[in-house]
Every structure is written in C-alpha cells, then in structure tokens.
Image (cartoon, rainbow, N blue to C red):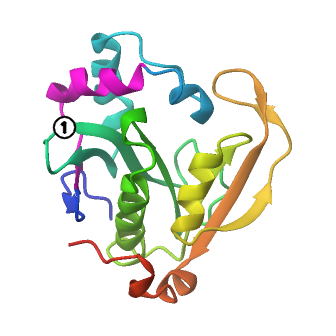
Amino acid sequence: MENEKCLLTTARLLLRPWEETDAKALFRYAQDPAIGPIAGWQPHTSVAHSLEIIRTVFAAPETYAMVLKATGEPVGSAGIMFGEGMHSAAMQPDEAEIGYWIGVPYWGQGLTPEAVRCLLERCFTALDRSAVWCSHYDGNTQSRRVMEKCGFRFHHTEAPAPSPLGDIRTAHFLRITKAEWEQIPTTAGYPTPV
C-alpha cells in the first residue's frame, strides 16, 4: 500500500523522501518559532536535531520533503498518515490524514495547497482511501485556509486536550471524501499532479 520510495511532482514542487543531506535545509526552516509550536511541535534546536528528525519521524512511509523544483531545496514537509499511527482523527481503516508545514519565506505562495492536492490525488487513486482528514489547533488560520482551498469541510471540534507540547489546546477536524474530491472541477485551480 504505502511506498517509501515514491516521488511525486506538481507544477512547482517535487515531493520526495527526506534524505540525511537535507538536515541543514530542514533546520533553516524548522528552527523558526512561527512554525512548529502552532502545529504542536518544538522548533528544531540544531542541524543534529533536524538530522535526528529525518532519521526517525520523517523516515515514516508517505512522508515527503517539499522540494522547490527551481532550487532543489526542501522548504517544508507534507505527509500521509494512516489509522495505525499516533494521529488525532478517529479514522476508519480505509481513511488517511494529511499533515504539512512550510518555511515562513514561502507562506502565501500557494505551495502548500499544491502539495496537499497532490497528496489527495495519491490518497484517492493509488492508495484507494475513502476519505482524508486534516486538523489544526485554534489560532492556526493559515493551516485551515489550506484545507479549505483543497476542498476539506469542517467535521468536528474536539474538547480541549493536552497537545504534544503539554499545553491544553482545542483541535478542529476537517475531512474530504473521495466523492467530494471527485466533484471538484479541475478548472477551479485544482490541477492533477504532473
């Protein structure tokens, strides 16, 4: 089902597995306190810390470096997670969850929706999922906008609970079914990956 060696492309991005040689680029963006804490993870503290994340967290199947085709540099991460992992959404066996982040210099350029749309295509075609989830914490309006641009619809809000950082947060869940995804016109800025 999952393919650790999968390479995906969009108009501006290559989505590929993380490599140990990406540690410096990962640290460049993941050390920024504007990124990790709002998503529930600590900013990276060193290149060695980023390397350890590549070797552990980012070694999971279906976890991709978001690499700019123009520069060859990883500028964010996006991935597909399944029900057997430690994820928030109460997924059915044939569903998945997408998570993502991108470096601050690339906010507002439409790169994250481009990556998420590519992963949705993968979920609903190659991986035969019936629905895909995304979630965000209160205050992370940029992440919610990405979800809405990609066709996700609000599903539910969970009661405040401890985040991975130990504080208490409210999480909101959005979901898109395969049938809903199939109804999105390609002329609506939702291109099929190239």
Task: Name the residue at 59% across, 72% down.
Answer: 176
- Check the picture and name the quadrant holding the N terminus: bottom left
Above or below, 88 against 167 in this view is below
Question: Left or right: 128 with respect to 194?
Answer: right
Residue 25 sits inside the magenta stretch: yes
Residue 57 sits inside the magenta stretch: no
Question: Left or right: 186 with respect to 142?
Answer: left
Residue at which label 1 appears = 73
Q: Work out whether residue 45 or residue 141 is closer to the camera in this orientation and state it.
A: 141
Task: Name the residue at 36% across, 58% down.
Answer: 115
Above or below, 99 against 103 in this view is below
Question: Left or right: 20 with respect to 114?
Answer: left
Q: How many marks?
A: 1
Q: Is residue 185 visible?
A: yes
Q: Is residue 93 visible?
A: no
Q: Position of residue 68 (x, y in %)?
A: 21, 47
Above or below, 139 against 180 in this view is above
Q: Work out whether residue 117 or residue 59 is closer to the camera in this orientation and state it.
A: 117
**From which residue to which does the magenta span run?**
13-31
- Check the picture and name the quadrant holding the C terminus: bottom left
Task: Name the residue at 18% across, 34% down.
Answer: 19
The type of residue carrying mark 1 is Glu
Q: Position of residue 148 (x, y in %)?
A: 60, 65
Which element carries disc 1, helix, strand or loop?
loop
Task: Name the residue at 44% across, 43% down.
Answer: 107
